[in-house]
Amino acid sequence: PEYRSDQARALGERLRRLYECREERSLLGDDTAQINQEILAIRRELRQGPQLQAGEYLHDGRYRLVRRIGKGGFATVWQAYDRQAKEPVAVKVLHGQWVDDIQRLERFYRGARRMAQLHHSGIVRVVDEPQEERGFHYFVIEYVPGGDLRQKVLDHQISPAEGLKIIRAVGEALSHAHQLSLIHIFIARVVGYGGTIRFWKSGPHKENGWWRLDDDQKKEALHLFTNSVQP
């Protein structure tokens, strides 16, 4: 097989040996439960590709990874420490399994650039442009503590009055995006602290969640949106 890296080759060889071992044990009537678990773990690792670990650095030592704070089908988000700005940030890293998929890779980069165009207090800010290091493709965004809105709603921490304020704040952020001819597929994360609400998207959809509209579509979207949020 043509492996993408020496690490993948080593995993592939280990997997081959485990399959041979399982066949031998099966012929002898021995238990293969432990081997089956090891096979599944290696197959998962091969499918996902190389993985970053807490404590590693990106961008020539500027960003130190602290902990995973989110993971979807497209990317993993890390809380990190920006040693240059001396503040926490979030690093969104494309899953290793997609690095050889040109379309997904281009979509990841385009989405980051589109997101960087949005300058609004209700939208997570892009701190550093998308880049690649050691086979990892990533970009850096503002870190917003405080958890996500969905969990707060499930925990009954949001009153109806607060909910209305949050809806209005998110609507204003979306309106800003619409003015730049961008419309969001869906709101995947709403995070906030100290009364400030921000949203961001993490997923494998068009342009990282953003659709580019032509002039007619923009007018229609703004009209529908404006009518829907009027008190």
Image (cartoon, rainbow, N blue to C red):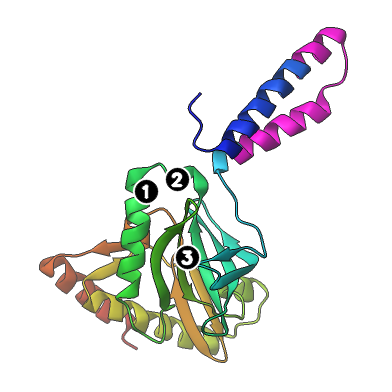
- Precedes in sequence: disc 3 or disc 1: 1
100 vs 209: above or below: above
Task: Examine the structure image and report whether residue 27 is included in the region drawn in magenta.
Answer: yes
Packing grade of label 1 (10 A; few <14, some 14-19, many >=20) is: some
Quarter of the figure with the C terminus: bottom left
Query: Viewer-proximal residue, 55 or 119?
Result: 55
Spatial distance from mark 2 to mark 1, Cα to Cα? 7 Å
**In this view, the mark in front (2 or 3):** 2
Which amino acid type corresponds to the residue marked 2 in the rendered image?
Trp
- Image location (x, y in percent) of residue 76: 54, 58
Asked if labels 3 and 2 touch by Cβ distance under 8 angstroms, the answer is: no
- Which region is colored magenta? 22-45
Amino acid at the residue labelled 3: Ala
Q: Main secondary structure of the magenta part?
A: helix
Which numbered dot is residue 188? 3
* Residue at 36 percent of width and 85 percent of height: 120
The circle on residue 98 is: 2
